[in-house]
C-alpha cells in the first residue's frame, strides 16, 4: 500500500511551467493542454519566454510540479543552466523537468540525461499532441509520487525472525 499525501499537501491546480523562446510553441502547447486535468485537478500552464523569466516565475510559484524546458534560448545552454538553478540553488528535486529541443546537436541526449537530473528529453519534432499530454500526465504522476514519498513516515525496521527448533 502506498502512502498518498493528504489532499491539502497537493495544489488545487497542477502548475506546469513552459519555458521556450518560440511564441508558437507556447500557443500550440496552450491549445493542446487546454482542459487537461489529472486526478480531478486542472493543469495551469505558466509561460516563460526565457530562462530569466522562468527564474522569476519560480520565485513566485513554489509549487510547480513540472517544467517543460527548451535547451537553447537566450544562450546555447540556457535550459541546462535553468535545470542547475532548480536542482542546486532552489534544491527542488520533486519538480519533474523535461527538456525539449529543436537543436539536439547543441545538447546531445546521451550527454545531458546522465549528467543532469532531468526526467525526460524530447525533440520538438517528436512531440505530437497526444505525446505532449502523456508527458504532462506522467510528469504530474511522478511529482505526486515524489511528494508522497517525502511525506511518508519511515518504515519501521524489520523484526528479527525467530525460529524454533521444530523448523529445522
Image: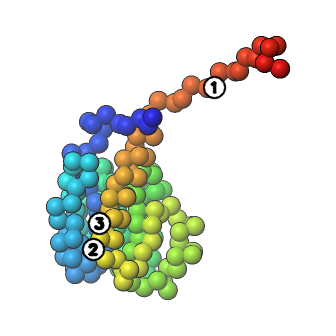
For residue 159, which quarter of the picture? Answer: top right
What is the CA distance from the residue labelled 3 to the residue labelled 2? 6 Å
| Residue for badge 3 | 133
> Sequence order check: which comes first, mark 1 or mark 3?
3
Instruction: Between residue 108 and residue 161, name the one nearer to us.
Output: 161
Q: Position of residue 58 (x, y in %)?
A: 31, 57
Q: Secondary structure at mark 2?
A: helix
Q: Secondary structure at mark 3?
A: helix
Whether the residues at callouts 1 and 3 have beta carbons within 8 Å, the answer is no
Q: Which residue is mark 1?
A: 158
Near mark 3 (Cα within 10 A), the count class, few <14, some 14-19 or many ≥20, is some
Q: Mark 2: few, some, or many residues within 10 Å (few <14, many ≥20)? A: some
Residue 65 drawn at (x, y percent):
33, 54
Left or right side of 29 for 117: right
List the residue tagged with mark 2: 129
* Residue 14 horizontal side relative to residue 92, left or right: left
Residue 52's tag is none
Name the residue located 20 percent from the left edge and 53 percent from the top edge. Answer: 42
Looking at the picture, tell me which residue is in the foreground, 125 or 21.
125
Amino acid at each position: 500500500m502506498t502512502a498518498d499525501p493528504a489532499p491539502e499537501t497537493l495544489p488545487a491546480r497542477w502548475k506546469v511551467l513552459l519555458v521556450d523562446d518560440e511564441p508558437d510553441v507556447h500557443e500550440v502547447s496552450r491549445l493542446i493542454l487546454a482542459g487537461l486535468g489529472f486526478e480531478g485537478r486542472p493543469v495551469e500552464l505558466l509561460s516563460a519566454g526565457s530562462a530569466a523569466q522562468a527564474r522569476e516565475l519560480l520565485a513566485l510559484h513554489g509549487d510547480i510540479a513540472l517544467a517543460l524546458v527548451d535547451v537553447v534560448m537566450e544562450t546555447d545552454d540556457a535550459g541546462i543552466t535553468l535545470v542547475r538553478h532548480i536542482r542546486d540553488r532552489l534544491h527542488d528535486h520533486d519538480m519533474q523537468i523535461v527538456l525539449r529541443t529543436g537543436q539536439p546537436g547543441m545538447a546531445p541526449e546521451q550527454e545531458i540525461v546522465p549528467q543532469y537530473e532531468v526526467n525526460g528529453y524530447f525533440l520538438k519534432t517528436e512531440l505530437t499532441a497526444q505525446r505532449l499530454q502523456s508527458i504532462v500526465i506522467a510528469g504530474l504522476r511522478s511529482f505526486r509520487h515524489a511528494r508522497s514519498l517525502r511525506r511518508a513516515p519511515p518504515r519501521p525496521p524489520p523484526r528479527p525472525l525467530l525460529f524454533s527448533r521444530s523448523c529445522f
